[in-house]
Amino acid sequence: MARKGLLSLFASSWWHLVFPPLCLHCDQAVSDEKLLCPDCVSLLQLLPQEGRCYQCFIDGLEIGQERCHTCQQTSLPWKRAAAVWDYLGPAATLVKRLKYGGQQHLAAAAAAFMVTQLVTLEWPTPDAIIPVPIPWLKSLSRGYNQSELLANEMGKLLQVPVVKALKRYHGDYSQAGLNHDQRQQLSSHRFAFRDGYDIADKTVLLVDDVLTTGSTLRHCCDVLLAGYPKEVYALTVCRATG
Ligand SMILES: [Zn+2]
Ligand SMILES: [Zn+2]
């Protein structure tokens, strides 16, 4: 082994002796640089479609029912929306670390589960993946858009182009503390279609980190429909509960 290799092996062993790798969620020691301990991994079961609304992915539906009461009353612009997990436990930690903790490498792991969910739900392989843009002030302070990282990793796995067809042209405020109606109002002017992208007759997949009220996805999707896609699917890592 080269001297440089030996040195880095020594440095890494020393580092792990003093600072053993810990589970991302519960801080239990983990082996082989794993992100999560076996207990936390066991909590990462994909949310099933059964009992969930095809359009907003809320659970509690009766067998054979495809849409929840609200979605029966309202027509949503996408064909299907789903999440991989509820925004709880290790899944929530994964998203928070990716979004707020600067741990961009976590996008690859989350995207692998997103692809698995897409296949499990028997959605078609999209022709293009479109990330939900974040306000430019956030992208400036964070240095990246977590949804774009997720879309890029999904694109690599599915061999599908990532198309940044949406832009967010104002709304640099946090939605925290706002009620459902206020969020809806603020979202109505936030997104625009970038010129030069052709999504006509294409199946597109909109990607975001968390599905909360669905208003962000709804407004993105409304804008995308101006490009006449064949159909729009929306997938997020987590779905907020309650
Ligand atoms: Zn753990
Ligand atoms: Zn619904």
Image (tube, rainbow, N blue to C red):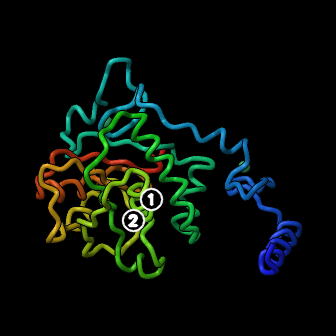
Category of crowding for the residue at label 1, using alpha-carbon neighbours closer than 10 angstroms: few (below 14), some (14–19), many (at least 20):
many
Above/below status of 105 relative to 56: below
Which of the 4 image quadrants contains residue 80? top left
**Which residue corresponds to the image point at 48% horizontal and 36% vertical from the top-left?**
47
How many marks do you count on the picture? 2
Q: Give the side of residue 113 with respect to residue 166, left or right.
A: right
Q: Which mark is residue 153?
A: 1
Question: Can see residue 208?
Answer: yes
**Which residue corresponds to the image point at 42% horizontal and 76% vertical from the top-left?**
138
Q: Which residue has dot 2 on it? A: 148
Residue farthest to the front, as pictured: 1
Q: Quadrant of the N terminus?
A: bottom right
Residue 121 in the image: state x and y as whole percent. Answer: 39, 34
**N-terminal-most mark, 1 or 2:** 2
**Which residue corresponds to the image point at 27% horizontal and 57% vertical from the top-left?**
184
Question: Under tag 1, what secondary structure?
Answer: helix
**Which residue corresponds to the image point at 55% horizontal and 54% vertical from the top-left?**
109
Q: Is mark 1 within 8 Å of ligand 1?
A: no
Q: Give the side of residue 15 with respect to residue 38, left or right.
A: right
